């Protein structure tokens, strides 16, 4: 699994003009599920995201997690994180999980984030979404459950 994690002031996601998920201060997680990913990947990423110390403490140092600040998470499925652009001009998506598998692991990821008490909003899996992100910092990190980066 791969995630783009962004520290945000606020964010929302709409489908067909209707807001389906919205958060205030916290994190936006764009989540891609890869071929061969398992529950252990969802657990690893959820634990990593919930505990990333990327919020500033009273001294201005990034020492606090989204849990520490009682922030929220907006989790958006994004299979394009497994797009391979090395050849040609059209990305290939053969490394992305099949939609049924991806949905199951995406749901597991969300449930794991909720376990420690995080408020988690989501988009609509498999739908065309418009995501508004007000990035703070900006702080944007890449996390991969296989630890390739």
Image (cartoon, rainbow, N blue to C red):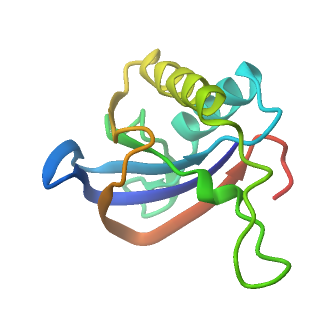
Of residue 42 and residue 77, the one placed in the foreground of this image is: 77
Say left or right for 128 vs 5: left
Relative vertical location of residue 29 with respect to residue 8 in this rendering, above or below: above
Q: x, y percentage for residue 149?
A: 81, 59
At a point 74% along the width and 42% down the height, the residue shown is 34
Relative vertical location of residue 115 with respect to residue 46 in this rendering, above or below: above
Q: x, y percentage for residue 2?
A: 68, 48
Q: x, y percentage for residue 73?
A: 37, 40
Give the farthest residue toward the top.
115
Say left or right for 139 vs 137: right
User: How many labels were placed on the picture?
Assistant: 0
Give the farthest residue toward the left.
18
Q: Quadrant of residue 49?
A: top right
Relative vertical location of residue 53 with respect to residue 92 in this rendering, above or below: above
At a point 53% along the width and 65% down the height, the residue shown is 140
At a point 71% along the width and 39% down the height, the residue shown is 97
Of residue 106 and residue 95, the one placed in the foreground of this image is: 95
Give the farthest residue toward the bottom.
89
Q: x, y percentage for residue 115?
A: 46, 15
Question: In which quadrant will I find the N terminus?
Answer: top right
């Amino acid at each position: 699994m791969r995630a783009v994690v962004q520290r945000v002031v606020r964010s929302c996601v709409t489908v067909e003009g209707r807001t389906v998920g919205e958060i205030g201060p916290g994190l936006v997680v764009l989540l891609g599920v890869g071929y061969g990913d398992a529950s252990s990947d969802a657990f690893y990423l959820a634990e990593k995201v919930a505990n990333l110390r990327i919020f500033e403490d009273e001294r201005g140092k990034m020492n606090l997690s989204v849990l520490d600040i009682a922030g929220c998470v907006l989790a958006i499925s994004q299979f394009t994180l497994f797009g391979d652009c090395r050849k040609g001009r059209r990305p290939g998506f053969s490394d992305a999980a099949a939609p049924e598998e991806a949905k199951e692991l995406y749901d597991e990821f969300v449930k794991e984030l909720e376990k420690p008490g995080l408020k988690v909003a989501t988009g609509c899996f498999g739908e065309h979404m418009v995501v508004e992100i007000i990035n703070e910092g900006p702080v944007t990190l890449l996390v991969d459950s296989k630890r390739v980066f």
